[in-house]
Amino acid sequence: MKTKARSFSRAAAASAFLATSLGVSLVLASSAAGAASTLGAAAAQTGRYFGAAVAAGKLGDSTYVNILNREFSMITPENEMKWDATEPNRGQFNYSGGDRILNQAVSTGKRVRGHALLWYQQEPGWAQRMEGSDLRAAMMNHVTTVATHYKGKIYAWDVVNEAFADGGSGGRRDSNLQRTGNDWIEAAFRAARAADPDAKLCYNDYNTDGVNAKSTGIYNMVRDFKSRGVPIDCVGFQSHLSGNPPGDYQANLQRFADLGVEVQITELDISGSNQAGAYGTVTRACMAVSRCAGLTTWGIRDTDSWRSGENPLLFDGNGNKKAAYTSVLDALNAGGPTVPTTPTTPTTPTTPTTPTTPTTPTTPTTTTPVPSGCSASVSLNQWNGGFVANVKVTAGSTGLTGWRVTTNLPSGAAVTNSWSAGNSGTTGSVTWTNVSYNGTVAAGQSTEFGFQGTGTAEGVTASCAAS
Ligand code: G2I
């Protein structure tokens, strides 16, 4: 594979040869062009990022912040965007820690990976005590509300974290989230896409570092999602490793990439005596997979790590670069194929009509307020020959236990696909009914459903009735 760094070295060697034969002494700078001196800059040469998990509570520590600002181009909030942090009480959202980290990132030109919208751990106490359709509604409301708060500001969301079981089953992990129905993951991805169409949507898990039962279970889910048009853009491999990654680490990343999703190393930390070597191997694997968009270490200094005592990171407790740091930097500078720029996948399957004429997206075209019942508004993303409509249903002063929305599509427009609501009819006047988990909407709160279609839906109207 040709890389900038390598072709420069060849050119440099040629000029050195020429200079020598001409009797001219030539001094090559130790940091040749193409060999960057920070992790973020080195990764950027091939369109990749290099990130770190960051704790808001450490943003006052100058050693920490100096390394962060100098080395990293992506930030993952270590805990601040988790469910227990962002919705400590049902319906009461708190973005203070998440916003602090986001502001730090934005003000220093870095991007943010959102972590994590739904995870069976770090559920707030009130959610831990819930089950069934009540919990499903709370989950969807959480995804929609948090993703809406951060709309347009997040590079990628870990929409669902650690939903698969360890061991040989290759199946889902039991949890109250899982017990709301096997479709909870796709419902979460659809809700996240509707709320923030520009964020890449990832599934994230650990013990997926080679081809094994767990990673294969996830692989099958991603393949199924892609075939049915469930919006998924990326898979996160946490890579909490002890020693070397398995020999098929790169092949495993590649098989996911071949499904058409981006892969990302999301929580890297490595213990053991061959730490520097193992870090190099992981970094080279990502560099060799064109759809591997970047790596994130789970913390900055060893003393910041959740694996206290194992010293698994790239900087020691004093903030000095370790051998593992150099190993990673060299692997990034050695280059690899550039990451292709992939837009987020369309929300639904069917014909991938290229959106040639992007009419202004997400313009609320209609709002029909109903004081005590409900109101519905449509956001339309129209392109030449097709559209995606997201419909927001807002409960009036008495709340809802069920709803019915009627959309009036202009002639020529036809529904081909939908999510989070059942429909009767596909053209003209189409009636939509809530599904089991989104019929109950508290007073003043909202839920969303959506549909895709062919033709032009501009001018579509929507009205809502309680049922
Ligand atoms: O467990 C390691 C990681 C596995 N993958 C998902 C990640 O989100 C997870 O990160 C860790 C954080 O590094 C820890 O910092 O997740 C833990 C559980 O959320 C985090 O620990 C928690 C403690 O359990 C809490 O007691 C504490 O209040 O950190 C919180 C904030 O310091």
Image (cartoon, rainbow, N blue to C red):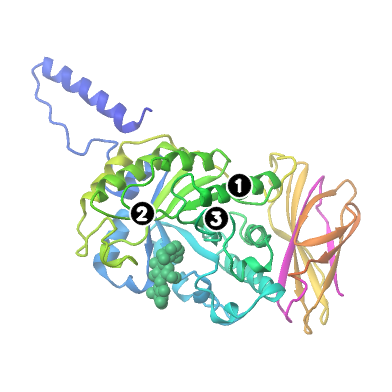
Q: What percent of the width, then of the height, locates residue 395?
A: 77, 77
Residue nearest the viewer, comparing 143 with 394: 143
**In the image, residue 405 above or below residue 384:** below
Kindly check if marks 1 and 2 are in contact, taking CB atoms under 8 A apart as contact: no
Which amino acid does the dot numbered 3 rest on?
Tyr
Q: Earlier in the sequence, mark 1 or mark 2?
A: 1
Where does label 2 land, which residue? 241
Question: In what quadrant of the picture does the N terminus appear?
Answer: top left
Residue nearest the viewer, comparing 237 with 328: 237
Residue 54, picture quadrant: bottom left
SS assignment at label 2: strand
Q: Residue at x 68, y 60 (%)?
A: 183
Relative placement, left or right, of 14 versus 116 is left
**In the image, residue 86 above or below residue 195:** below
Specify whether tag 1 is near ligand 1 (CB below 8 Å): no
**Numbered range of the magenta stretch:** 439-467
Q: Residue at x 47, y 58 (%)?
A: 113
| Camera-side mark, 2 or 3 | 2
Which amino acid does the dot numbered 1 rest on?
Asn
Where does label 1 land, which residue? 220
Does the magenta run of residues contain 457? yes
| Camera-side mark, 1 or 3 | 1
Where does label 3 land, which residue? 203
Q: What percent of the width, then of the height, locates residue 220?
A: 61, 47
Kindly check if marks 1 and 3 are in contact, taking CB atoms under 8 A apart as contact: no
Does the magenta run of residues contain 330? no
